[in-house]
Image (cartoon, rainbow, N blue to C red):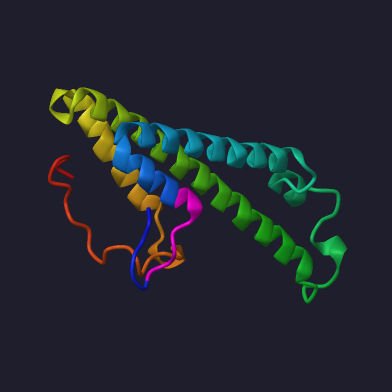
């Protein structure tokens, strides 16, 4: 969403979302959910491609050469490459999991906006809270480029109760 003041400038997509949200908040959520689904599919496709490549952890770890065949222990580049790949792969898996939870949450939010939160079953409310907790557990504040623009402390949502 658009930021004012000293914070980071909003992207054109952010401005468009704000404009649509001002006119039709329900449709804005539907569009954002679709964008997230598209992005998650790209991340999942990347994971599939990495898993099927020669750079897959199982192929690198149990690959054609053993660590000893690459040279002395001082030759850390091979180990560094393997460890770097593992970190990237793990982070992509976390991203996919977080996106999946956020997409599910957006779907539930759209449903709630259609029927009204008071008309949402308790199991859906509980699922929304669980999704929120899952997404928060995957969030790393130190890696967020917009952390200064974000509120310092979490305030409870008065309408949703969490």
Q: Residue at x 55, y 35 (%)?
A: 38
Q: Position of residue 135 (x, y in %)?
A: 36, 46
In front: 55, or 39? 39
Asked whether 29 falls inside the magenta stretch, the response is: no
Q: Which residues are magenta?
A: 7-14
Q: Position of residue 119 (x, y in %)?
A: 15, 23
Residue 131 visible, this angle:
no
Image quadrant where one finds the C terminus: top left
Picture quadrant where residue 128 is located: top left
Q: Position of residue 26 (x, y in %)?
A: 31, 32
Q: Residue furthest bottom?
A: 74
Number of numbered tags placed on the structure image: 0
Name the residue: 55% across, 45% down: 93
Residue at 22% x, 63% y is 153
* 17 horizontally vs 90: left or right: left
Report the magenta stretch's main SS.
Answer: loop
Quarter of the image for residue 112 reads: top left
Q: Is residue 115 above or below residue 13?
A: above
Whether residue 58 can be seen here: yes
Report the residue at 35% width, 44% height from top: 134
Q: Quadrant of residue 52?
A: top right
The relative height of residue 88 versus residue 107 in the rendered view (above or below) is below
Q: Nearer the viewer, residue 42 or 59?
A: 42
In percent of width and height, residue 160 lies at: 17, 40
């Amino acid at each position: 969403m658009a930021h004012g003041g000293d914070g980071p400038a909003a992207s054109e997509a952010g401005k468009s979302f704000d404009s649509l949200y001002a006119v039709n908040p329900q449709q804005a959520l539907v569009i954002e959910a679709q964008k997230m689904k598209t992005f998650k599919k790209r991340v999942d496709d990347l994971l599939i491609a990495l898993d099927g490549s020669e750079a897959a952890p199982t192929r690198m770890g149990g690959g054609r050469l053993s660590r000893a065949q690459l040279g002395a222990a001082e030759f850390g580049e091979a180990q560094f490459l393997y460890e770097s790949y593992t970190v990237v792969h793990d982070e992509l898996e976390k991203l996919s999991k977080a996106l999946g939870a956020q997409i599910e949450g957006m779907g539930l939010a759209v449903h709630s906006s259609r029927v009204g939160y008071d008309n949402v079953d308790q199991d859906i409310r509980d699922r929304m809270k669980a999704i929120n907790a899952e997404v928060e557990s995957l969030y790393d504040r130190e890696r967020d480029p917009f952390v200064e623009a974000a509120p310092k402390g979490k305030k409870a949502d008065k309408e949703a109760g969490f």
